[in-house]
Image (cartoon, rainbow, N blue to C red):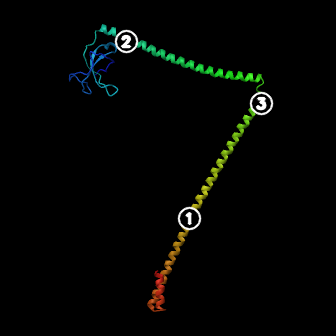
C-alpha cells in the first residue's frame, strides 16, 4: 500500500471510478480519480482511496493508471521541487530570524521608553527643585508623613488582627463551655433517670410485699374485709 501523494485538480480526470473494480484495500469502496502533484510523481494519474484523512484512515493509492515516468523526466521534475523546498525552507528561516529580530527591537524599545520616562521625571523634579516649587523641608515632612501613615496603618492592621484572634479565642472558649454544659446536662439527666428507675423498682417491690400481706390477711380473715378490698383495689390501680 502506497501513501496517497499530494494531488491537483484536473477536470479531465476526476470523480469516482464507475467500474466495480478495483476497490480500495481497507474499505472496499470504489476509488476516486486523482492526479499526483508531488516530486517525481507529478502528473501521474492514479485511483485513490475515497476516505479523506480527516475523517478516517486513508488506504493510499489503489492503482496507478500511468506507469513511472522516464528517469530523465523524473530528474527534470525533481529539480523544480527541490528548488521549491529550498526556497520555502529559506523563507521559514528568514521569518524566524525576522521574528527574533523584531522581538529584540521591541524589548529594546520598551527598555528605552522606561528609561526615557524615568529621565523625564528626574529632570522635572530637578527643575521643580531649582525653581523653588518644592521646598526641602516640605519634601522631608511629606516623606515623614508617608512613613508615619505606613507605620500607623501597620499598627491598625496589627491591632485588628489581635482583636480578631481574641474574638476567635473567646468564641472557642464559649463553645467549650457550651459543650461542657451539654455534657453535664446529659450526665445529670442520665443520673436522674437512673435514680427514678431505682425508686420505681423499690416501689414495685414494696407494692408486691403489700399485696402479699393483704392477700394473707384476706385468707386468714383478719381485719375488715371491705377495707382490705379497697386497699387491694388501690394497689391494683
Q: Nearer the viewer, residue 34 or 64?
A: 34
Q: Select label 2 or label 3 by which is in front.
A: 3
Label 1 CA crowd tier, 10 Å (few <14, some 14–19, many 20+):
few
Identify the residue under disc 3: 138
Q: CA distance from mark 3 to mark 1?
A: 72 Å
Query: Sequence order check: which comes first, mark 3 or mark 1?
Result: 3
- Position of 134 with respect to 9 (left or right) is right
Residue 81, numbered circle: 2
Q: Residues within 10 Å of mark 2 (few under 14, many from 20)?
A: some
Relative to 108, residue 177 above or below: below
Residue 64 percent location from the top left of the image: 26, 17
Q: Which mark is on residue 187?
A: 1
Query: Residue at 60% of width from left, 21% of height from top?
Result: 110
| Residue appearing at x 60%, y 56% in the figure | 176
Q: Earlier in the sequence, mark 2 or mark 1?
A: 2
How many marks the image carries: the answer is 3
Quadrant position of the N terminus in the picture: top left
Number of other residues with Cα within 10 Å of mark 3, as a class: few under 14, some 14 to 19, many 20 or more: few
In front of the other: 7 or 76: 7
Where residue 35 sits in the image (x, y, percent)?
29, 16
Report helix, strand or loop for mark 1.
Answer: helix
First along the sequence among labels 2 and 3 = 2
Q: In the image as oriented, which residue stretches furthest toward the left?
A: 20
**Whole-percent x and y of residue 70?**
28, 9
Q: Secondary structure at mark 3?
A: helix
Residue depicted at 60% across the width and 55% down the height: 175
Tag 2 and tag 1, C-beta contact below 8 Å:
no
Measure the alpha-carbon separation of dots 2 and 1.
96 Å
Amino acid at each position: 500500500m502506497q501513501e496517497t501523494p499530494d494531488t491537483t485538480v484536473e477536470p479531465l480526470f476526476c470523480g469516482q471510478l464507475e467500474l466495480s473494480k478495483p476497490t480500495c484495500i481497507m474499505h472496499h469502496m470504489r476509488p476516486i480519480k486523482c492526479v499526483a502533484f508531488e516530486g517525481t510523481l507529478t502528473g501521474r494519474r492514479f485511483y485513490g482511496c475515497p476516505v479523506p484523512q480527516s475523517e478516517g484512515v486513508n488506504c493510499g493509492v489503489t492503482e496507478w493508471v500511468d506507469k513511472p515516468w522516464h528517469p530523465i523526466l523524473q530528474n527534470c521534475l525533481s529539480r523544480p521541487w527541490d528548488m521549491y523546498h529550498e526556497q520555502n525552507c529559506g523563507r521559514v528561516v528568514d521569518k524566524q530570524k525576522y521574528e527574533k529580530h523584531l522581538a529584540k527591537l521591541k524589548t529594546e524599545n520598551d527598555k528605552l521608553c522606561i528609561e526615557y520616562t524615568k529621565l523625564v521625571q528626574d529632570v522635572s523634579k530637578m527643575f521643580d527643585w531649582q525653581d523653588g516649587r518644592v521646598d526641602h523641608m516640605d519634601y522631608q515632612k511629606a516623606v515623614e508623613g508617608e512613613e508615619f501613615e505606613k507605620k500607623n496603618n501597620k499598627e491598625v492592621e496589627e491591632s485588628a488582627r489581635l482583636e480578631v484572634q481574641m474574638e476567635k479565642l473567646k468564641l472557642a472558649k464559649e463553645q467549650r463551655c457550651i459543650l461542657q454544659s451539654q455534657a453535664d446536662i446529659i450526665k445529670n439527666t442520665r443520673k436522674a433517670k437512673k435514680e427514678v428507675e431505682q425508686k420505681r423498682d423499690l416501689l414495685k417491690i414494696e407494692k408486691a410485699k403489700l399485696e402479699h400481706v393483704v392477700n394473707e390477711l384476706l385468707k386468714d380473715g383478719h381485719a375488715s374485709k371491705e377495707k382490705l378490698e379497697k386497699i387491694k383495689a388501690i394497689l391494683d390501680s
